[in-house]
Amino acid sequence: MLSDVTTPQDLDDRFRESLAALTTPPHRTDPAGPVAEGSALTGAQLLELFDAQVTSRQLDLAGRWLRSFGEGYYTIGSAGHEGNAAVAAALRPTDPALLHYRSGAFYCVRAAQAAQAAQPAQARPATDVAGAGRPGESGATGQPAPQPVSAETSGQESVPVASGQPATGPVTAESDSTAGASADSGQAAGVEDVESDPVVPAAHSRPVTAPGPVGAPGDGDPPGGLRMTVVKRPVSRAYTDAARDALRGMVASSQEPIAGGRHKVFGHADLAVVPTTSTIASHLPRAVGMGLAVERLRRLDARGEANRGTPEPEPAPWPADAIVVCSFGDASINHASATAALNTAGWYDHTGLRIPVLFVCEDNGLGISVRSPQGWVATALRSKPGIRYFAADGSDLVGTYEAAVEAAAWVRRHRRPAVLHLTTVRLMGHAGADAESAYRTAAEIAADVDRDPLVATARRLVDAGLASGTELLDRYDEIGWQVRRIAEQVLDEPKLADAAEVIAPLAPRRPVRVALAVADAGTRAAGPDAGERAEAFGGKPPELAGPLTLAQSINAALTDGLLNHPQMAVFGEDVAVKGGVYGVTKGLRDRFGAARVFDTLLDETSILGLGLGAGLAGMLPVPEIQYLAYLHNAEDQLRGEAATMRFFSQGAWRNPMVVRVAGLAYQEGFGGHFHNDNSVAVLRDVPGLVIAVPARPDDAAAMLRTCLASAAVDGSVCVFLEPIALYHTRDLYTDGDGEWLASYPEPSAWAGGHVPVGRARVYGVGSAEDVTIITFGNGVRMSLRAASTLADEGIGTRVVDLRWLAPLPVADLIREAAATGRVLVVDETRRSGGVGEGVIAALVDAGYVGAARRVAAVDSFVPLGPAARQVLVSEEAITQGARTLLAR
């Protein structure tokens, strides 16, 4: 039997046996008093947290039940991790949270906190809940009032604490009375008969002076039926609403509030819970970015600069002293993403920058079947420089709460990162299909069941004289009945019915609004902001500087972008002090300061993570990846995190971002494959990602403006791929002709020169009637040179610059291909998986019946020196390809 103890039925049986064995307390204590001497938790609050734990457990059981007849699609549960209810209770409902998939109890408590904070002050119960009714505050969104606290044991300097911190000293019992005390104890519990005001402990809850047993000495129950109103009260509406959210996710209901049936995630915009994907630890770099952005916006708010003249939406509604919480499992600490995030948080802390993030590692000792070595997690987490370490037994709800309060208070006060290490257990295996008896002994499984956090909390309640085992079992059954009833209801809810419905939130495009945003930026730059703009350019705006190179044009467009978007920040390796390895960001730091243009550590995962978090916090991040080959170290931050945010949140959350990437080949006398990478297949495969490749200086400025506007208006994630070899190119046909240079448009011309996403540029050479060359990037210059040679032979050519690799300009391709009936695709990426494959496929899908041919790079890495010419596309190959088409 021990090998089966984590089946749903047996776990339920063991719980019932454990509660039945609990003795009835000899006398009752006032639930308004502390659950233990010196504890900040009252009995009433502990009872509410027990309800959250039970709701989470019943959700796991319901998930297995749904799966048993093919109507449930997600069985990774929270059983054994229900101690994270106390972590939620130690935080505020306005602290943004990124939760891993065993966070059912946390989610329930956060829902209750948010519901409480949303009530008018006069309607709230006297007992505080996190985020509402704080001493010194006007309400959930009011500015915090500092309160004195004692110096911390860490020896660090004590500073005034913001509201929401734990305070010492007793208060009167009236200030911490329980909610629902007047509820009708005999009322039948139904789905509609629920309590709207659960009593959830706040991070600032104060211990109440214990009045001693209630009632006459020797009485088993307190007078007036107090026991009935506290233990046998209606189930919190917030908990049943949270349960409904989770169950809708399990059955893939299109009415699920965050992902709409696209995935089972914990997330809700109203709860400040940001959905995370199933990719292990990939949300940790985002959490660091959120922490950096929250602190930056706090400082801007203090100076009144956070939204100065910005056309973008307001920043996320997080209070100035909010902290970011990010939970993950013990196996995740070994993942490269986690290592990068923790290292980055410590690195910034070492440099003096503040990152208010509380990492929560829930350590059950297993990564599916792989054990974490004894002591490894604690050793690894303790050794992280710049990150304060806290620990607690996740099965001890009271101890976990106290540790979480201390950790959250430390992060909030010092604006520095910390990690809370919770030892937990995993019950019912990794997921429904996991037969853990195949890799764990019966004794190991039984030992985990003996540490069941629900049983531990029930035992604490009985020992404290707050309930009997029978009463708590009745509560367990009542909540279980509620959850099962909701599970039956959500079965009938609609699912996503077609592809259009599935992809609707993925990457919405509003080209008219984007065009208007570009036009408005030009109007402001030419009008009210003209003086500021002239000052930023040192009195000589770029339109007066003469023809510019590609690098100079991008630099000018970045300057205009920083002027137009006050929330924009440019960052990456070597972008600030040095001005970029190719000088593209030269002078930006001097013009806009280190808060908006800054260098990062050399880690692409962290650079993109900073961008992800900053975008979510209301900023417009423009991170730079120094070379395209370096992006491959961090692709999941774009694929698994950036591109999925709108998809998994139905647009409730967005992370606008323009990622500048220096890439492609043809650097003369420099590099090898890491500095001449020509592979973009991994980017083109990401749904919703915008990929821009400017070849000409005039296109570069206009396309960068479009990307910035698209990010600001639609929340787009854009990759702006800059051909390195064209950065400083000046000539097109002959040395000194200067035909690759272009003038920078004055702001009044920005609207007229707007380049919409997904529109190509066409050059006619000669008669332009014989052959159509479709290309991009370096291929544009080579193709124009080849077209000139062909024109001398009497062959007219249309050269189509794609400009956008995703979405492809399909309508333009079809029109230009049909114009000649002969198409030569010049693709500087590799033949297999290259851009050319997508172009040919688009033509075929559209019914193109003319001749077509490809010229592409060889399936090879780019070698060093002259050998590169053997594998890359050449002008001669383009010319010969066109001749071959015409010879057919």
Image (spheres, helix red, strand yellow):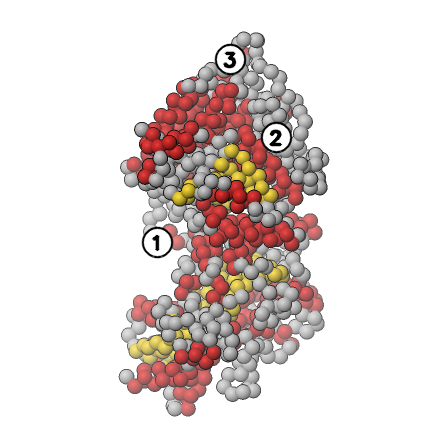
Q: Amino acid at mark 1?
A: Ala
What numbered label is drawn on residue 205? 2
Residue 796 in which image quadrant: bottom left
Q: Secondary structure at mark 2?
A: loop
What numbered label is drawn on residue 499? 1
> Residue at 60% across / 65% down in the picture?
575
- Vertical position of residue 248 compared to residue 810: above or below: above
The residues tagged by marks 2 and 3 sit, at their Cα atoms, a distance apart of 28 Å
- Name the spot of residue 270 as percent of width and height, x first: 52, 42
Specify the quadrant that holds the C terminus: bottom left
Task: Name the residue carrying label 3.
Answer: 26
> Residue at 62% across / 38% down in the picture?
409
- Name the spot of residue 384 as percent of width and height, x first: 57, 48
The residues tagged by marks 2 and 1 sit, at their Cα atoms, a distance apart of 49 Å
Q: Secondary structure at mark 3?
A: loop
What numbered label is drawn on residue 719? none
Q: Amino acid at mark 2?
A: Ser
- Name the spot of residue 680 as percent of width and height, x first: 43, 66
Is residue 502 shown left or right of residue 756? Answer: left
Q: Earlier in the sequence, mark 2 or mark 1?
A: 2
Along the line of sight, the residue nearer the viewer: 63 or 131: 63
The residues tagged by marks 1 and 3 sit, at their Cα atoms, a distance apart of 62 Å
Question: Does residue 263 appear anywhere in the picture?
Answer: yes
Residue 599 in which image quadrant: bottom right
